[in-house]
Image: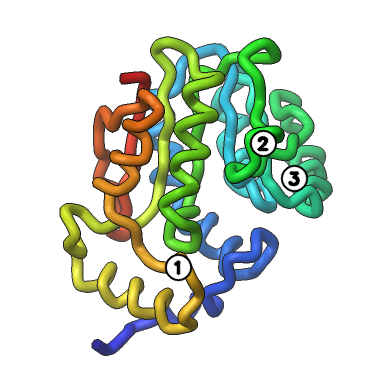
Amino acid sequence: MTVNVPTDRPPIDPHPLSPYVAWAGNRNRDPILTVFKDIFPKSGNVLELASGSGNHVNFFAPHFPGLTFQPSDYDVEVFEAIKKKRAEHGNGNISDPIKIDLTAPDTWPSADERLYDAIFVVNLFQVAPVSICDGIAQVAERVLTKDGFVAIYGPFKVGGQYTTESNAAFDQEILAPKVAEWGLKDVKDLEKAANAHNIALKRIVDMPANNLILLFGRA
């Protein structure tokens, strides 16, 4: 299969501070914001998982002055980048980043500290194992409000099939380095992982560039 790579796109590199991650974040943030404007509450708390450089949380926050955003990541080395962007944008509704490793329950937040009306994660699963969804679902089970939701954005397979030829080509490009757990995941596999922790898929939103937003809530 021939892989057509956009000429302006940096080489795939999942490191949170890489040029590729910045390019992808700038490319998808406006369509995601459009959806979030329809589904986010007017007030409350929002948790971002795998915040990376803080590109998304700092872009979204000014549009929701009634919300408090909590960035998080497993890699504490990115925290300074998140805080630097917060200062540059004057985003007073973004808390200091916290460490959440989705494979380490001792790092997960507690409902005694805060409940969240929304949890979101962007472009994670093409370079992360399906098992990470177990961590997301368990965090949601702990700290999601009764009517809260989890929004997971990215490219996915549906029913074991690619939804477009471009997603098939993108997957072949991701798989080429032969890194374990890289590659597009199937929506059903994420749904199965979430169901084990009383979190259910409620809605799928079609997005530009053949991506999806998967919206989960309490079962």
Where is mark 1, residue-wise?
A: 182
Quadrant where the N terminus sits is bottom left
Query: Quick one: label 1 or label 3, which is nearer the N terminus?
Result: 3
Where is mark 2, residue-wise?
A: 71
For this view, does 131 lie left or right of residue 204? Answer: right
Secondary structure beneath dot 1 equals loop
Q: Residue type at mark 2? A: Pro
Q: Position of residue 49 (x, y in %)?
A: 58, 40
Query: Quick one: label 2 or label 3, which is nearer the N terminus?
Result: 2
Q: Position of residue 166 (x, y in %)?
A: 26, 72
Q: Quadrant of residue 143?
A: top right
Q: Which mark is residue 82?
A: 3
Q: How is the image coloured?
A: rainbow
Q: CA distance from mark 2 to mark 1?
A: 24 Å
Q: Residue type at mark 1? A: Trp
For the residue pair 115 and 54, the one nearer the viewer reads as 115
Q: Residue at x 36, y 40 (%)?
A: 193
Q: CA distance from mark 1 to mark 3?
A: 25 Å
Q: Are marks 2 and 3 in contact (CB under 8 Å)?
A: yes
Q: Are marks 2 and 1 in contact (CB under 8 Å)?
A: no
Vertical position of residue 20 compared to residue 45: above or below: below
